[in-house]
Amino acid sequence: MRTTNRLILAGALLAASSAATAGDLLQWQNNSITYLYGKDFTVNPSIQQTFTFEHADGWKYGDNFLFVDKIFYNGKKDALAGPNTYYGEFSPRLSFGKIFDQKIAFGPIKDVLLAMTYEFGEGDNESYLIGPGFDLAIPGFDYFQLNFYQRQTEGNRAGDGVWQITPVWSYTLPVGKSDILIDGFMDWVVDNDETRRGTYHANLHFNPQIKYDLGKALNWGEKQLYVGIEYDYWKDKYGIEDTSSFDTDQNTTSLLVKVHF
């Protein structure tokens, strides 16, 4: 992605954010805070506690998703970030169906969108992504998104022409008096041409959460309080190739408490 494309993406991100804040355009929104505790992380210190703020909304011309992680290393220090760090992503999508006020549906596809993401954080973490997105109608799922991005990774890991495939899903399973919610995402960076990409290696990040709706079970209100686990598998974490001298393949599970408001 060239500089002009990055400027277009930055402008679209700002426009989507500004428009979604207008009350007459906002259709729905949801916010949450999650606490995670896990061990056996790689690259960074192995024990981590994370507080995550998430925001999702739908508006007249698309949808937005934002999360920000504040990560603590349990008293240890990361070589680059110190005892704690932060990381976030802002992912607006513009819906062609909503923009043109037309139903765009064929086969399992419910809508076609322009999907974008801005990744940010401490250190060498800035990336810009843009590409086509699709909302899919898959039986049983609350929602299923499939986004294809051209990825531009900045800094020392810079490279052009890298493609990423990102499915996002949610599935609710009734259990007794309550529900189990299985949701999450996968980021699959498929390109590994180092002559064009610099040092950013192809990688696969699979990150589902399995959560029990404790609030519903206790009659406090459904979809408000969850407990469960988050599974995190990341092959070649951060796009750093795994070697015999430096392990970058991550396979860990964290305990989770999540509150929606």
Image (tube, rainbow, N blue to C red):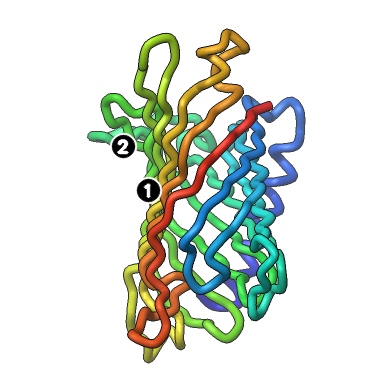
Q: Is residue 148 visible?
A: no
Identify the secondary structure beneath mark 1.
Answer: strand
Q: From the viewer's side, name the closer residue of 68 and 245.
A: 245
> Which residue extends farthest front?
75
Task: Of the two numbered discs 1 and 2 on the same chain, state the one appearing first in sequence.
Answer: 2
Residue 91, compared with residue 2, is above or below; it is: above
Q: From the viewer's side, name the closer residue of 185 and 5.
A: 185
Indicate the quadrant where residue 239 lies: bottom left
Picture disc at residue 134: none
Residue at point 60% right, 60% down? 118
Q: Which residue is the site of mark 2? A: 109
Q: Is residue 204 visible?
A: yes
Left or right of residue 176: residue 56? right
What is the crowding at mark 1: few (fewer than 14 residues within 10 Å), some, or many (at least 20)?
Answer: some
- Under mark 1, the amino acid is Pro
Tell me the quadrant of the picture where the C terminus can be found.
Answer: top right
Indicate the quadrant where residue 196 lies: bottom left
* Picture coordinates of residue 153, whole percent (x, y): 53, 75
Disc 1 from disc 2: Cα separation: 13 Å
What is the crowding at mark 2: few (fewer than 14 residues within 10 Å), some, or many (at least 20)?
Answer: some
Left or right of residue 81: residue 43? left
Q: From the viewer's side, name the closer residue of 214 and 8.
A: 214
Q: From the viewer's side, name the closer residue of 77 and 86.
A: 77
Residue at point 43% right, 9% down? 177
* Picture coordinates of residue 95, whole percent (x, y): 50, 40
Residue 116, compared with residue 104, is above or below; it is: below
Identify the secondary structure beneath mark 2.
Answer: strand
Picture disc at residue 167: 1
Residue at point 66% right, 52% down? 68
